[in-house]
């Protein structure tokens, strides 16, 4: 029993970041995500003997985490009603396919810069409303199909596509505004540095004092 507990502790350490990140992207709430992660590992413990050597264990953990998150939202968040009574968009149809995409980090950036960009993306993603953020996360991070997302959220495929499209647009707009503000701050700083000239301690040669 003690050996099993030690193995499970190592198992949790190995996968806890992935489980927590999966939960926090959907819930946009760190406290709730921690509760979901704990519940996920409680379920994993019950099946640990069959799970520990399973090659697809990460997929199992992500599926359990995702389902627990969606159940939590359905049960405890009244604003989840948007999924059932949101007015259908005029663009909703099964043949419509969004072409926008979330910009990926530049390969020329340093690891610190990439880390900052990931943190910014997480922050802006968490600021999206549930009905936009969750389909976007399920599509881009969990790699679910439109059909799987529609089935999980009990909404139409057309609404899934519409919400993902709007979420991408909102996210790209937030990123653009952030980048514009950052560039303006950099420009003003450079301007201040350019306009700053220390007084000369000595007169220039050939100029009368």
Image (spheres, grey):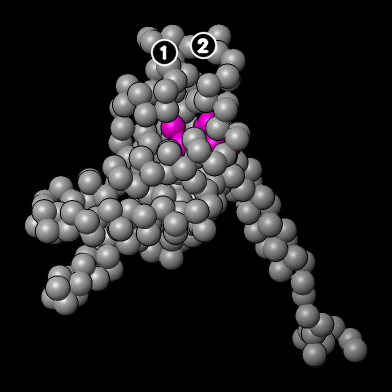
Q: Is residue 160 visible?
A: yes
For this view, does 31 lie left or right of residue 147?
right
Q: Residue at x 14, y 73 (%)?
A: 1
In the figure, 73 relative to 153: above or below? below
Q: Give how far across and how far down residue 41 sits, in percent.
A: 30, 58
In the figure, 159 relative to 203: above or below? above
Residue closer to the observer: 113 or 83: 83
Disc 2 and disc 1: Cα gap in Å? 7 Å
Is mark 2 in CB contact (under 8 Å) with mark 1?
Answer: yes
- Asked if residue 196 is among those painted magenta in the image, a careful observer would answer no
Q: Give how far across and how far down residue 207 sits, in percent.
A: 85, 83
Mark positioned earlier in the residue sequence (2 or 1)? 2
Q: Is residue 121 visible?
A: no
Name which quarter of the figure residue 151 lies in. top left
Residue closer to the observer: 74 or 204: 74
Q: Residue at x 41, y 53 (%)?
A: 36
Which is the main secondary structure of the residues drawn in magenta?
Answer: helix
Q: Give how far across and how far down residue 43 sits, in percent.
A: 28, 53
Q: Residue at x 59, y 48 (%)?
A: 179
- Asked if residue 134 is among those painted magenta in the image, a careful observer would answer yes
Q: Secondary structure at mark 1?
A: loop
Which quarter of the figure is the C terminus placed in?
bottom right
Q: Which residues are magenta?
A: 128-135
Q: Which residue is mark 2?
A: 91
Q: Which residue is mark 1?
A: 96
């Amino acid at each position: 029993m003690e050996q099993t507990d030690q193995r499970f502790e190592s198992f949790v350490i190995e996968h806890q970041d992935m489980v927590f990140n999966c939960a926090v992207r959907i819930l946009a709430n760190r406290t709730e995500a921690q509760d979901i992660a704990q519940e996920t590992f409680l379920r994993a413990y019950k099946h640990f003997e069959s799970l520990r050597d399973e090659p697809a264990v990460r997929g199992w953990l992500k599926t359990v985490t995702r389902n627990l998150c969606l159940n939590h939202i359905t049960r405890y968040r009244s604003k989840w009603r948007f999924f059932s009574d949101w007015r259908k968009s005029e663009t909703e149809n099964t043949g419509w396919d969004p072409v926008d995409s979330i910009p990926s980090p530049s390969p020329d950036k340093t690891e610190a810069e990439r880390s900052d960009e990931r943190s910014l993306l997480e922050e802006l993603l968490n600021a999206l409303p549930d009905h936009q953020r969750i389909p976007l996360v399920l599509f881009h991070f969990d790699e679910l199909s439109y059909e799987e997302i529609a089935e999980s959220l009990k909404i139409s495929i057309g609404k899934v596509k519409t919400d993902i499209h709007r979420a991408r647009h909102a996210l790209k707009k937030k990123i653009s505004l952030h980048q514009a503000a950052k560039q303006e701050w950099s420009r003003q700083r450079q301007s201040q540095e350019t306009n700053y000239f220390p007084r000369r301690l000595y007169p220039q040669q050939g100029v009368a004092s």
